[in-house]
Amino acid sequence: MLELGSKAPAISLADQDGKIVSLEDFPGKKIILYFYPKDNTPGCTRQAQAFAELNDAFAAKNAVVIGVSKDSVASHRKFADKFSLPFTLLSDPDRQAIEAYGVWQEKKNYGKVTMGVVRSTYVIDESGIIVKVQSKVKPDTNAAELLAWLG
């Protein structure tokens, strides 16, 4: 995981429409950058729906929501359409951002150790500095906690 106060690593990845999106595309905005394991799984769906429900409230606080997973552009398109997600989903099959942000980690599930994306969220301020780091977040409360934190 990256440290509070550090410069957010630059990323450029394809979104659910195949368009290349970079963090620099959001000047003057706070970025809620959340990493999740997989489209269309129960926890990831609940987390995405919570961010979708609060999307206008984040926008009112000058913040944009961006989700990142290893899923393909096509998978993201289907996920966004199925649940009417109003925010950007970035496809990171080569784990460029996932590894740069330190969220590719060992996970234990029923005694089995595997590597995977640890559900994590970063808040990046208008000047590209990480101002909040959350690891192993709960999908049902993550969006509301961040909105409250933004004030």
Image (spheres, rainbow, N blue to C red):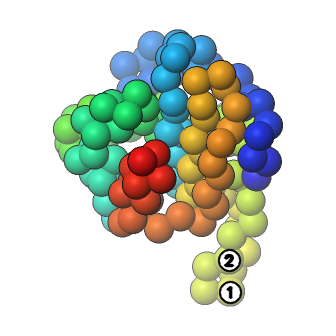
Q: Within 10 Å of the Cα at label 2, are there few (<14), some (14-19), or many (20+) other Cα atoms?
A: few
From this viewpoint, is residue 146 visible? no
Tell me, yes or no, whether the two marked residues, 2 and 1, touch with CB atoms within 8 Å: yes
Q: Is residue 33 left or right of residue 64?
A: right
From this viewpoint, is residue 34 visible? yes
Q: Position of residue 79 (x, y in %)?
A: 30, 41
Taking depth in this image into account, of 85 and 125 the one nearest to the observer is 125
Q: Within 10 Å of the Cα at label 1, are there few (<14), some (14-19), or many (20+) other Cα atoms?
A: few
Q: Residue at x 76, y 52 (%)?
A: 1
Residue wearing tag 2: 108
User: What kind of residue is marked 1?
Assistant: Gly
Residue 100 lies in quadrant = top right
Say what secondary structure mark 1 lies in. Answer: loop
Residue wearing tag 1: 111
Q: Residue at x 67, y 25 (%)?
A: 128
Q: Residue at x 53, y 54 (%)?
A: 37
Q: Is residue 109 left or right of residue 113?
A: left
User: What kind of residue is marked 2?
Assistant: Lys
Q: Position of residue 51 (x, y in %)?
A: 33, 47
Say what secondary structure mark 2 lies in. Answer: strand
Compared with 38, 26 (above or below) is above
Residue 47 lies in quadrant = bottom left
Taking depth in this image into account, of 113 and 10 the one nearest to the observer is 10
Q: Is residue 97 left or right of residue 119?
A: right
Compared with 34, 142 (above or below) is below
Q: Residue furthest front?
A: 151
